[in-house]
Amino acid sequence: MGWYGYLALWCGLFGVVALIGYGRSLAGMTRAQRTVRVVGRIERVGEPRHGSSPSLGIPVVVSFRDPSTGEEFTVTNDGERGDRITAAWAGREIGVRYPPGSPQAFRFTSSLGEGGRGLGRPNFAVFLIYAGVVVVVAVDRGWPWALLGFGGLWAISGLYHLPGNMRDVNRRLDTVDSMAVVPGRVVAVIKSVSVADDDGHVSTRLVPVVAFSTRDGTAVTAYCDSGLPDPAGSRGRDVTIHYAPDDPAVFTPDPAAERRSCKQDIVYNILGLLAVVAATVVGAVAL
């Protein structure tokens, strides 16, 4: 069997996967569509234990109501409970999802909106079909077809997403410029330790936990992943917090660094688009 025979099998296999996935989505049978999603509310917030793992999230007590029965549940985020909670305050709304009829199997989610349509797997299957065609054609006819095939796809994707990415960055810049300023304090430093499989190198990641009160008196506890120098010795340190008035989960102790990050994102988006466009042009010229 030649290259094109294997390609036919490849496309047939993943074509079936894609068709089944799209069919299940149209019928409303995917897991994402069947999952019950409700909005919970944080009732109480605890303080992370100094030296604990960042994967645990900030300890909270959350209440939510099952729409099918009207029963109210009060739960915590102990154990594996979906998305970790990295910013919390009493009264904050948080997404809760669970299988139909099984609210005890709840998971927290950072999204308060409706779930997707379960198109991730069929879309990926279509991409694999496309990738298989490009690879086989490139092997059969030469490397310019690979540049043209993959470069063209990413160029189209980049052109499609670039305006939205630019708007997101500009919104981030506007948010930084409108932030309120309040005093805060580092109440704990949590850490995760990982060991590399190849050479056994041990790396440690430190994340300070800050507590601050907004101007309207809301007490916020949150992970501070960046912006604080010497995180290892930061416990008990007084800090200045800049936060978005409409969402205290958006904050920074270093607004200048946040502005630099936004500008770097703009540069990276433009350079990435130029790179894939250049690769596509090279492939077309070399044909």
Image (tube, rainbow, N blue to C red):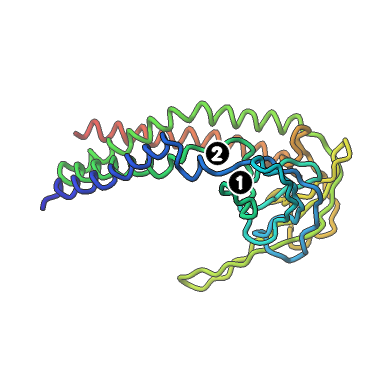
Choose between 189 and 27: the one closer to the eye. 27
Distance from label 1 to label 2 (Cα)?
Answer: 9 Å
Q: Is residue 147 left or right of residue 60?
A: left
Q: Pinpoint residue 100: horizontal percent, then vertical percent.
A: 57, 46
Q: Which mark is residue 97?
A: 1
Choose between 54 and 166: the one closer to the eye. 54
Q: Is residue 191 above or below residue 26?
A: below
Q: Are marks 1 and 2 in contact (CB under 8 Å)?
A: yes
Q: Residue at x 41, y 34 (%)?
A: 26
Q: Quadrant of the C terminus?
A: top left
Give residue 255's quadrant in the image: top right
Q: Which residue is mark 2?
A: 115
Q: Secondary structure at mark 2?
A: loop
Residue sitting farthest toward the left: 1
Q: Residue at x 76, y 32 (%)?
A: 246
Q: Is residue 35 left or right of residue 179?
A: left
Residue sitting farthest toward the front: 69
Choose between 116 and 213: the one closer to the eye. 116
Q: Pinpoint residue 262: horizontal percent, then vertical percent.
A: 61, 36
Give residue 50's quadrant in the image: bottom right
Q: Is residue 26 above or below residue 46?
A: above
